[in-house]
Amino acid sequence: VDREGYLDGSANPVVFLDVSVGGQGVGRIVAELYADVVPRTAENFRQLCTGETRRGGKPVGYKNATFHRCVRDYMIQGGDISTNGSGVTSIYNGGACFEDENFNVQHDAPGVLSMFNTGEHTNGCQFLITTVACPWLDGKNVAFGRVREGMLVVHKLENVPVGPNAAPTLPCVITECGEM
């Protein structure tokens, strides 16, 4: 699917994630969400970026969430808004997992935005951004967007020193996020 010109009239939402590593800002990731292909998945991510979904009167979203797994030559994983890598929260079903919408978008290049899951129909808040083409994820993880600006930031996260389970040794935090 050709997606050039995403900022000149596309109906697809565009979101941003401002990221820090070790307390220092490293830049902004800007991503187009493919609402025209996977509307429910894109809307879940968009609302977690804006914080417009509320529970108990408080916003639910990615602000102050971390990238808790960074694997060189594969992906960066983040967005667990409830724990440090095992939580699942969505805007649907009172916060529970939601179904795999479709697998029409391929993991064919660096910068593909995809849901992280633990099996069929277990989408929530966790996501990954590929740093290389990852065709083995096709048909297993719902890809729903692509980084349009900020791949340098993605590669900075990819190269952060890590410990066990590819956990960064420095905090990698989404300090601000929203819709453009």
Image: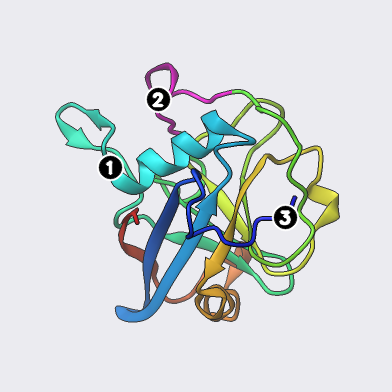
Query: Looking at the image, is 179 positioned above or below residue 119?
Result: below
Image quadrant in which you'd find residue 102: top right
Q: Going by the picture, which residue comes out furthest to the front? A: 9
Asked if the magenta segment contains residue 109, the reply would be no
The residue at which mark 3 appears reads as 2
Count of all numbered marks drawn on residues in the image: 3
Kind of residue at badge 3? Asp
Q: Going by the picture, which residue comes out furthest to the top? A: 93
* Residue at x 55%, y 31% (from the top left corner): 39
In magenta, the rendered stretch is 89-98
* Residue at x 17%, y 26% (from the top left corner): 56
Question: Can residue 82 be seen by looking at this rendering?
Answer: no
* Res 51 label: 1
Residue 4 image position (x, y, % from top left): 64, 61
Query: Looking at the image, is 121 positioned above or below residue 174?
Result: above
Mark 1 to mark 3: distance in Å? 30 Å
